[in-house]
Amino acid sequence: MIKLIYFEFNFWRIDISKLSLSYSEIPYKLEKLPRNEFFKKKKSGFFPFGQLPVMIIDKKMYGQTLAIAKFCASKSGLYGKNDKESLVIDQVLNWANDINTIIAPSIREKNREKQLKLRKNFVDNHLMIWFNFLEKLFLKTSKNKKFFTDRFSLADITAWRVIHWFISGKLELIDPKFIMSFKNLQKFYTGIYNKKSFNKLKEFEEIISN
């Protein structure tokens, strides 16, 4: 049994592993950790890298979002069947990690004035550039213009999840309509959203309902 530990909210860093496992009907347990409990355990050195998510298998704990996601996708048959497919998937994973890192300061900042300034800087100087990177990658790697590797994979789950985050309306100063500038990504997102074998998952429902 795979056990995943994360905070008490949905976020792409844990969702992509949950979605991968659920898609292939691989059982897992999820422990939702309150922040105060997380900080207590972090202080004691409980987590391998001092952060979440973590995964426990056979009483051994593993860390790092991308490592966990690739493990879960591999178990689910959603990672690369060859080196080139894996390379494409890894690029999407690292894109997600990079854009998350760039926007993170505007999320973590507590001072309201500084927070808005950081978010405006992200919107003005990074948002369109990084989604343009993703669209170019999609056009370069996808022949059928449905999936990044021409078969449903972790790349599609990750891209869909991060796009959903950015067009959810929950990120202040980011107009969800920005995605309309990326027609191919918009069509991709809609296709994954409407994929019946994917949108029937309870994890999918939890994401879109919150």
Image (cartoon, rainbow, N blue to C red):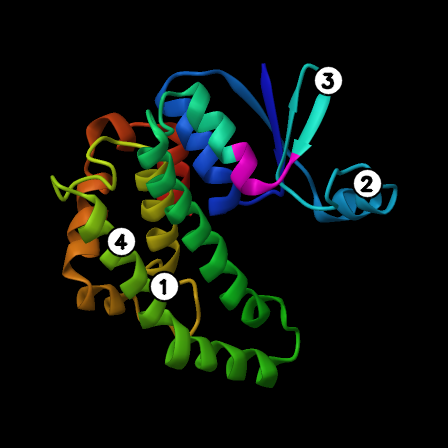
Could you tell me residue 101's position as x and y percent?
A: 54, 61
Which range is magenta? 63-68
Mark in front: 1 vs 4: 4
Q: Earlier in the sequence, mark 1 or mark 3?
A: 3
Q: Which residue is mark 3?
A: 59
Would you say residue 183 is visible in this rendering?
A: yes
Q: Of helix, strand and loop, which one carries label 1? A: loop
Q: Which residue is mark 2?
A: 41
Q: CA distance from mark 3 to mark 2?
A: 17 Å
x, y percentage for residue 69? 49, 34
Measuring from the top left, give residue 20's x and y in whole percent: 41, 28
Q: Is residue 195 above or below residue 145?
A: above
Query: Helix, strand, or loop for circle 4?
Result: helix
Instruction: Compare marks 2 and 4 and give the one earlier in the sequence.
Output: 2
Q: Amino acid at mark 2?
A: Lys
Q: Earlier in the sequence, mark 1 or mark 2?
A: 2
Confirm whether the magenta stretch covers residue 92.
Answer: no
Residues 136 and 121: in front is 136
Q: Which residue is mark 1?
A: 169
The residue depicted at 18 percent of the width and 65 percent of the height is 180
Q: Amino acid at mark 1?
A: Gly
> Dot 2: few (<14), some (14–19), or many (≥20) neighbours within 10 Å?
some
Name the residue tied to disc 4: 137
Q: Earlier in the sequence, mark 1 or mark 4?
A: 4
Mark 1 crowdedness (10 Å alpha carbons): few <14, some 14-19, many ≥20: few
